[in-house]
Image: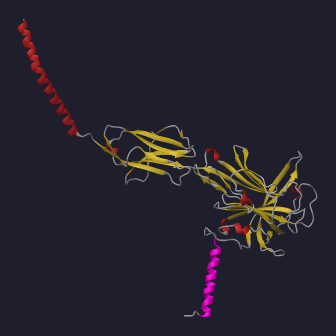
């Protein structure tokens, strides 16, 4: 049966719409922002001056602004400061995920630090003014920094750009071009011991064969150590952890060796394409959940007058801070627990793998009224979304009188047996003594 041409067209457009909808969703089901027209993006302006002591003073001013995507000559969509980002080989929108309300955007001025050079693209000038646009995902999916190049009508006079910033008025339209982006999809990393996490770092530049230098450093205790460096100009690299072949495609991700306690710190990925320098700080923290156990089963039966040492062990956790509490509550009764105060703690025990253990214990000598109570050990730790609980039910019984009676009768019988055995010997001894006399 032949499908009519009209039905074919309808099916084609439905199918095309579905494909387009799927393409507009990210691999994680996130909404694509590739075709977004504008984003609210406050502009952190600054004024810089030299004080009487010759020191540089900077005052920051938060100003309302928007980031608008379009072409040269477009009119601003909002009556505020507008940074118009025109088409280039670098489009920050292709890296964005989520919805617009999950993005925090901020624009700042960027100083080249006295480096005066022409950016190697058509239309660039020695006196170009630079801005950075940083977009953070509110749920920590990524952080991206884009360098925006703006060409002014005339060059600034002087050697230091931040002393002669271009004046930006409240409704100015600044036409810019995205020159470079530096992105990480791992703004922070939390893993356990002996893992090999991948620190994501990606960059893109608007021209081919850029003179790029990529570095990874680790900062901890106020000191920085170099982990890796690569220069495209010389082709030489130092250190390990980054696949050099992938740098040409903009992938500068760093793979850590199996994590240990000393792996914690802030990992810094930096990309320098003169006169631009972009970097992202990626803090790495280690975390291991405690293994919790108590030294009795789910039910503890005790005899009145006896006592029992009850131990709650939290083992293999990291970092150090952990909280162990014992409490009791009536089974099926009041929901308010009664926390025990006579708890003793061991010292923290450090294991070879860098994790810790701690014990909390108390001595229980229950009364008959304690029978039926539920005793619980609760362990809280940074690695846990909710505390771990281990519980047992207490049953208290009186001593068995039957056993007591059996013990007494057994004692009496033993005494009688001994008496029956000793009495004939005693009497025989007395007779023998009388015969001697």
**Screen quadrant of the N terminus:** bottom right
- Which residue is painted at 56% across and 50% down in the image? 382
Any magenta on residue 252?
no
Looking at the image, which is closer to me, 382 or 349?
349
Q: Where is residue 287 in the image (x, y as percent from the top left)?
A: 58, 50
Task: Answer with the quarter of the image where residue 124 lies.
Answer: bottom right
The span shown in magenta is 4-25
- Which residue is painted at 68% across and 69% down in the image? 100
Q: How many marks on residues?
A: 0
Any magenta on residue 20?
yes
Asked if residue 10 is positioned above or below residue 422 in the image, the reply reads below
Q: Which colour scheme is used?
A: secondary structure
Looking at the image, which is closer to me, 144 or 206?
206
Position of 61 with respect to 349 (left or right) is right
Q: Position of residue 330 (x, y in %)?
A: 38, 50
Secondary structure mostly taken by the magenta-highlighted segment of the chain: helix
**Residue found at the far left of this picture:** 435
Position of 13 with respect to 245 (left or right) is left
Q: Position of residue 323 (x, y in %)?
A: 52, 45
Q: Where is residue 260 in the image (x, y as percent from the top left)?
A: 61, 46
**Residue found at the far top of this picture:** 437
Can residue 39 be seen in the rendering of this structure? yes
Asked if residue 313 is positioned above or below residue 114 in the image, the reply reads above
Task: Answer with the quarter of the image where residue 157 lies.
Answer: bottom right
């Amino acid at each position: 049966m032949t499908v009519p041409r009209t039905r074919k067209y309808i099916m084609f457009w439905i199918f095309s719409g579905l494909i387009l909808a799927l393409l507009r969703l990210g691999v994680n089901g996130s909404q694509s922002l590739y075709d977004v027209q504008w984003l609210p993006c406050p502009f952190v302006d600054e004024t810089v001056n030299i004080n009487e002591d010759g020191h540089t003073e900077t005052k920051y001013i938060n100003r309302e602004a928007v980031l608008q995507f379009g072409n040269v000559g477009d009119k601003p969509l909002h009556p505020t400061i507008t940074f118009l980002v025109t088409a280039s080989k670098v489009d920050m929108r292709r890296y964005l995920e989520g919805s617009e309300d999950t993005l925090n955007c901020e624009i700042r001025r960027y100083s080249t630090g006295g480096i005066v050079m022409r950016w190697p693209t058509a239309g660039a000038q020695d006196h170009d003014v630079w801005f950075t646009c940083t977009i953070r995902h509110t749920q920590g999916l990524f952080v991206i920094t884009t360098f925006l190049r703006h060409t002014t009508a005339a060059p600034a006079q002087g050697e230091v750009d931040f002393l002669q910033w271009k004046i930006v008025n409240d409704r100015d339209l600044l036409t810019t071009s995205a020159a470079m982006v530096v992105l990480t999809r791992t703004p922070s990393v939390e893993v356990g011991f002996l893992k090999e996490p991948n620190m994501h770092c990606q960059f893109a530049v608007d021209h081919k064969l850029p003179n790029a230098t990529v570095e990874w450093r680790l900062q901890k205790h106020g000191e920085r150590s170099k982990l890796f460096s690569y220069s495209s100009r010389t082709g030489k690299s130092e250190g390990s952890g980054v696949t050099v072949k992938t740098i040409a495609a903009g992938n500068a991700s760093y793979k850590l060796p199996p994590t240990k306690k000393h792996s914690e710190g802030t990992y810094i990925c930096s990309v320098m394409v003169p006169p631009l320098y972009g970097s992202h700080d990626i803090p790495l923290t280690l975390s291991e959940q405690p293994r919790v156990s108590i030294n009795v089963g789910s039910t503890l039966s005790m005899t009145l007058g006896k006592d029992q040492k009850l131990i709650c062990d939290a083992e293999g956790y990291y970092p150090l801070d952990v909280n162990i509490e014992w409490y009791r509550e009536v089974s099926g009764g009041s929901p308010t627990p009664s926390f025990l105060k006579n708890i003793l703690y061991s010292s923290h025990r450090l294991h070879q793998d860098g994790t810790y253990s701690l014990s909390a214990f108390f001595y229980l000598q229950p009364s008959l009224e304690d029978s039926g109570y539920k005793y619980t050990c609760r362990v809280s730790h940074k690695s846990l979304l909710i505390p771990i609980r281990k519980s047992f039910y207490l049953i208290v019984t009186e001593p068995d009188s039957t056993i007591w009676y059996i013990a007494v009768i057994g004692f009496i019988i033993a005494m009688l047996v001994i008496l029956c055995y000793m009495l004939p010997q005693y009497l025989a001894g007395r007779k023998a003594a009388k015969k001697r006399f």
